[in-house]
């Protein structure tokens, strides 16, 4: 089954083609990596998928629903959870509240229930605290719950960002460079979590510019260069692909 | 003694303004420089209804607050796309426009001549022109405002507002309809500012456009920043301090031509000192970014 499908996306900035006639498919319950040299349009693709940018041409389809023209918050509600390359947490808010902002409330989101402090809202809030704590436990940040997000280390922030979109319960996870700048140990933790997500039936699409790091985790790799898809396939196929080597190394063999 | 109570009443009215602006600026992080415009709408609405149609100030107060909310919604809706400085300018424009209308639509507002003889609130046939009675009335409204804003901010809804303040894009990525929340916040803020305006008009019994200049909006913003953004206790402290402190100038025996500009200078100086030593305000937890 197809979870996410891009149909000939095209996006340009002031005449420079950022994404050029790009089509790809992400199957349900798979791990797909989007790789490419710097400036190849990976993050632009993410911004289009999550609705922050609108493509000039082409369509985005999530679970058989056209999401191309929807606003980012609606796309998030429909089941696309994304992280950001430059990590966008809520810095002056506690770690626990950061996760809780990802949760969907039934009554507490509404102004009326806040104004009258309804019992249902309070009950919901207690359940949400438990859910958020479980997620913090999952990524190993439970003991940091009360700290402000701005006081976390780089690796912890990456993990918190993951916990936050877990709270959103998306159908597909879009992770923008989840392992960039991490220590090898945290890198392994992150990959471990991504594998666990896959085992529990989730779909993951992630960006990485280091080709070697993705080889042992991705099931499918899509390689971009100058906004165009130059290769797509299993890690073995990509390793042997001449176009890819050229884009990365400027020559045809290692 | 009456003079002292008068100061407390004015401070109470400013506390309502400060609390409601704190919801917009301190909790949600939206730059708003036109808050007094909503008070102006509230004040003129209930005064004109009372003077021209003999409508009870109580009903006028509610209608004024609702009209202020509607104005808040009308202005906010197109400015939702604007961020930071641009939103500040749009709201500043609102302040100037409302002030100009109050000053120039002479047929309705009597312009710079103002509206004299605004009737006081009546309770069981008893006219509340006693300062003590009015102090109690203002304190009740301060309490209502405080509870409302406290409940709103102390909830998942309030957490979303803080999320918007911290990072709008991340809030959207978390599936929050940021524009809807901003609109609600402006409507609530305008509602309470409208109440404050109405309370002021029926207390002083005379209003003219000079009470609702852009400088007043900035004073209220200063109270929010001084007390601490995102701190309700701070709003109490900020508004009270900036109303009561300048009153001491009166006792120095200065002519009003010196005292008035001196008041502005003291405000400016206080803000500079604060920004250097305590950028989060006296009781605030959140720093400017």
Image (cartoon, rainbow, N blue to C red):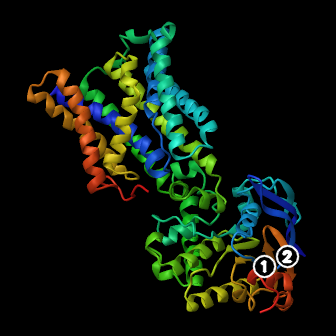
**Point 25% across, 49% down: residue:** B273
Percent position of residue B99, x then y:
46, 22
Chain for numbered disc 2: A
Percent position of residue A170, x then y:
72, 70
**Quadrant including the N terminus of chain B:** top left
- A83 sits left or right of B264 in the view: right
Residue pointed to by mark 2: A230
Q: Element at badge 1?
A: helix
Q: Nearer the viewer, residue A138 or B50?
A: A138
Residue pointed to by mark 1: A247
- B235 sits left or right of A129 in the view: left
Q: Quadrant of residue A197?
A: bottom right
- A119 sits left or right of B34 in the view: right
Q: Nearer the viewer, residue A66 or A170?
A: A66
Marks 2,1: beta carbons within 8 A: yes
Q: Quadrant of residue B240?
A: top left
Q: Nearer the viewer, residue A248 or A179?
A: A248
**Point 58% across, 33% down: residue:** B75
Q: How many marks?
A: 2
Percent position of residue A198, x then y:
75, 84
Chain for numbered disc 1: A
Residue neighbourhood size for the residue with mark 1, other residues' Cα within 10 Å, grouped as few (<14), some (14–19), many (≥20): some
Q: Residue furthest front?
A: A251
Q: CA distance from mark 2 to mark 1?
A: 9 Å
Q: Is residue B124 among the parts visible in the rendering? A: no
């Amino acid at each position: 089954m197809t979870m996410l499908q891009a149909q000939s996306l095209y996006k340009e900035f002031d005449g420079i083609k950022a994404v050029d006639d790009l089509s790809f498919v992400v199957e349900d319950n798979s791990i797909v990596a989007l790789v490419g040299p710097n400036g190849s349009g990976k993050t632009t693709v993410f911004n289009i998928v999550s609705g922050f940018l609108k493509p000039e041409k082409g369509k985005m389809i999530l679970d058989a629903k056209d999401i191309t023209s929807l606003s980012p918050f609606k796309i998030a509600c429909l089941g696309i959870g994304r992280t950001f390359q430059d990590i966008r947490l809520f810095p002056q808010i506690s770690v626990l509240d950061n996760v809780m902002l990802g949760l969907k409330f039934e009554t507490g989101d509404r102004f009326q229930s806040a104004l009258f402090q309804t019992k249902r809202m309070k009950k919901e809030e207690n359940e949400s605290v438990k859910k958020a704590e479980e997620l913090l436990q999952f990524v190993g940040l439970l003991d940091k719950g009360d700290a402000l997000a701005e006081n976390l280390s780089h690796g912890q922030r990456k993990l918190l960002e993951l916990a936050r979109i877990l709270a959103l319960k998306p159908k597909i996870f879009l992770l923008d460079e989840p392992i960039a700048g991490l220590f090898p140990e945290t890198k392994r933790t992150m990959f471990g979590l991504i594998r666990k997500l896959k085992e529990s039936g989730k779909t993951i699409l992630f960006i990485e510019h280091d080709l070697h790091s993705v080889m042992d985790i991705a099931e499918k790799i899509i390689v971009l260069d100058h906004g165009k898809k130059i290769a797509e396939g299993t890690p073995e196929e990509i390793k042997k692909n001449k176009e890819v080597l050229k884009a990365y190394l400027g020559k045809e063999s290692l | 003694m009456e003079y002292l109570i008068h100061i407390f009443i004015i401070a109470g009215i400013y506390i309502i303004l400060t609390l409601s602006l704190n919801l917009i600026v301190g909790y949600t992080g939206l730059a708003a420089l036109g808050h007094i415009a909503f008070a102006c709408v509230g004040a003129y609405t209930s005064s004109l209804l009372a003077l021209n149609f003999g409508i009870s100030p109580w009903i006028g107060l509610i209608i004024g607050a609702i009209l202020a909310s509607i104005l808040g919604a009308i202005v906010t809706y197109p400015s939702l796309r604007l961020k930071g400085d641009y939103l500040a300018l749009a709201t500043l424009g609102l302040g100037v426009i409302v002030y100009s209308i109050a000053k120039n639509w002479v047929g309705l507002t009597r312009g710079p001549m103002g509206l004299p003889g605004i009737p006081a609130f009546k309770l069981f046939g008893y006219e509340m022109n006693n300062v003590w009675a009015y102090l109690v009335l203002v304190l009740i409204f301060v309490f209502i405002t405080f509870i409302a804003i406290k409940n709103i901010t102390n909830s998942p809804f309030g957490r979303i507002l803080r999320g918007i303040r911290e990072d709008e894009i991340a809030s959207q990525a978390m599936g929050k309809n940021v524009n809807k929340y901003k609109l609600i916040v402006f409507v609530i803020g305008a509602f309470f500012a409208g109440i404050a305006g109405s309370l002021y008009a029926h207390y002083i019994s005379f209003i003219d456009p000079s009470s609702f200049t852009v400088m007043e909006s900035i004073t209220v913003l200063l109270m929010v920043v001084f007390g601490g953004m995102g701190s309700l206790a701070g709003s109490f402290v900020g508004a009270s301090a900036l109303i009561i402190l300048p009153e001491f100038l009166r006792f120095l025996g200065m002519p009003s031509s010196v005292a008035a500009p001196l008041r502005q200078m003291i405000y400016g100086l206080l803000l500079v000192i604060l920004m250097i030593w305590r950028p989060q305000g006296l009781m605030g937890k959140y720093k400017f970014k």
